[in-house]
Amino acid sequence: PSETGLDGWLRYAALPDEFANLRSRYSTIISLTGNQSSPVFTAARELQVGLSKILGQSVNLETKLPGIADVSSIVVGTVKTFLSAGRDTPDILSLKEDGYCLICKDGKATEIIGQNEQGALYGAFEFLRLLSRNQPLPNMHISNPSAPIRWVNQWDNLDGTIERGYAGPSIFFADGYVLEDLTRVQQYARLLASVGLNGLIVNNVNSNYNLLNPINMQGLARIADIMRPWGVRIGISLYFDTPKGLGGLRTSDPLDPDVIAWWGSITSELYRHVPDMLGYLIKANSEGQPGPLTYGRTLADGANMFARALQPHGDGIVMYRAFVYNHHLDESDWKNDRANAAVEYFDGLDTQFEDNVIIQIKYGPIDFQIREPPSPLLAHLRKTPIILELQVTQEYLGQQDHVVYLPPLWKTIFNFDLHVDGQQSLVRDIVSGQRFNWSRSGYAAVVNVGNDPTWLGSHLAMANLYAYGLCTWDPQQSEIDIIQGWTQLTFGLHKTIVDTITSISMASWPTYEDYSGNLGIQTLCDIVTHCHYGPCPASQDGNGWGQWTRANAHSIGMDRTVATGTGNSGQYPQVVAERFERIDTTPDELLLWFHHVPYTHRLKSGKTVIQHFYDSHYAGALVAQTFPQQWEALRGLIDNDRFDHVAFRLRYQAGHALVWRDSINNFYYAKCGIKDEHNRVGNH
Ligand code: GCU
């Protein structure tokens, strides 16, 4: 049979006949609301669709609760509707916003109780996941998300292109307008909701003002309407100079009364169309964009202007991006460092922001590299909450042509202890709001699905979207459990399938690191043409972008120490700063991020830096050769279409890994002239 991938992990493959006894167990779904646009009703319908596919039988959907629900029914609702239907609810105090309780007791109806309407939907999806995976159903299971903000960003342009999108044109826009047919948007909302994601910013951070015309505002209303039953709310990115460009004002100065009034009226207009709008994502004074600094104002002045425009309308927030830096930096100055920019620009502003401003911070100080320490800004904000920005789209990480399963990388950030104020401060506890008592904070990932039937251009890449949702719900979940669960739902329960995909996925990030950028040197891809793809180590240096390696004939790496370098290590709290300041306490994988050393410097492993480069590139490329071979084990166990699609990509990756290996090794060999101990490099 052929499978397009449109359902992603929501295929609901039929369970084998030995599970026939479940058929009588689940014959009726009872929704405690009849309102068809409520996520509770969506949950009931999803249960109906899912169960009928999994069990191969028709399942009824009812909206009226009989006195005592039959044992063969599943009742879904919120705490409130359960109470008003006169049913007992479990300890509701332990339910947090969006949480749910799943009760599967023998001899009783199954109950899915959401803290709110979305919670009921998340509980329904969890129930369907357990059933599809043939996992034991819990007697009673309460589950709460780690953070209230679990959003995705799309970098879609109104002309239908997607910045850093690798899976075809936009599912939202074409030719300057919101698409008429939003079928794919509805399917996307379903995928997002299924893993607990509850918000989406629809347009590119590099935005313009064309989204704000009357036709597109109606279009935004249609997008919001179609996503709302899935509990996914929308927000938009704004262009800072819109008052000048669209409003015809002489300035976009955030303190100018006309500018303030202009944004006020645009915001009211937007809320007329999207009454539950999430708010505004702002990229300003970054990569040539205008912003408050353009008008001699502070970043807080800029953020607060939008925040005040939103305040009269509900709970809308400003997601103000910390990605503010000068991209014309002079490399000849040893002290210059783009990694310092965020802390420098936001210095002293922590107490200056309105309550509905949240700072959105990329996980690392530079830009979605294969290996970065956490952004030091994560340790500087106490009062102003944050959103941690990740990428599901693999901008620097092979752009979905290479399989790179991302949770192991994300975990290096989530589990990092920043030791703020001398106390344990895991990044995941800062992000959840727990560390500094924030009520609203969380995660955003740039996803960039397109209208390709696989959504991301590659079937295996979808594991990252699934994992992103699960990680925002619980950042401590094991990355192995996540990939195994995803594989079972997407490709089937057969052990060979699960073991093979788990093996490839778990090896994929270290493998990509081995052949694309070692020891914290960053991903050595093409920076100058901005494609961020393929090996091009020469392009890192000699430009103003600041993603430098400072490689010369003798030595390599960024000296980010306080003693002799850019001082970046000193932006971290003391315990961390001291660790990164010294070579002997900096872990090898971040050595060249923080230190400039000779190629002959010996690592903790005993190898020299250059030999480590050579060896890792051979080792990584070798592992990549095994991926297509491993995949062969799945021939005949999964449908041919998806088998061939993945096989093709893995073969390509294996070839491209050799290109990476030889390009990088030859480049550094040519630079330093140090021979490979195993005599491989330079001998082609
Ligand atoms: C990266 C990316 C850009 C993007 C920018 C951002 O630099 O390459 O395309 O606009 O990040 O996050 O704003």
Image (spheres, rainbow, N blue to C red):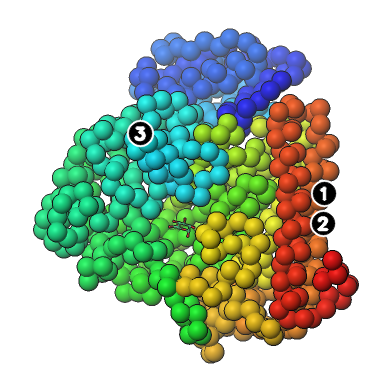
Residue 554 position by quadrant: bottom right
Instruction: Find residue 622 and name its label.
Output: 2
Tell me the crowding category of disc 1: few under 14, some 14 to 19, or many 20 or more residues within 10 angstroms, Cα based.
some
The mark that comes first in sequence, 1 or 3, is 3
The reply to whether residue 563 is visible in this rendering is yes
What is the distance, in whole Å, between disc 2 and disc 1 at their CAs?
Answer: 7 Å
Mark 3: which amino acid? Answer: Val
The residue carrying mark 2 has its beta carbon less than 8 Å from ligand 1: no
Q: Which residue is mark 1?
A: 626
The furthest residue to the left: 257
Against 55, is 5 above or below?
below
Q: CA distance from mark 1 to mark 3?
A: 43 Å
- Which is nearer the eye, 436 or 301? 301
Secondary structure beneath disc 1?
A: helix
- Disc 3 residue: CB within 8 Å of ligand 1: no
- Name the foreground residue: 227 vs 619: 619
Quadrant for the C terminus in the image: bottom right
The reply to whether the C-beta atoms of the residues labelled 3 and 2 are less than 8 Å apart is no
Would residue 66 appear left or right of 239 to someone viewing this image?
Answer: right
Q: Tell me the residue at 48%/85% (across/down).
A: 333
Q: Is mark 1 within 8 Å of ligand 1?
A: no
The location of residue 115, given as percent across then percent down, is 41, 35
- Quadrant that contains the N terminus: top right
Who's the residue at 76% across and 75% down the image? 669
Task: Estimate the x, y position of residue 173 in percent, counting from the top left.
Answer: 39, 36
The residue to which callout 3 is attached is 178
Please report the residue visible at 22 percent of the width from the left and 35 percent of the height from the top. 214
In whole angstroms, how far apart are the C-alphas of marks 3 and 2? 46 Å
Are the residues at dot 2 and dot 1 in contact (C-beta closer than 8 Å)? yes
The amino acid type found where label 1 is placed reads Thr
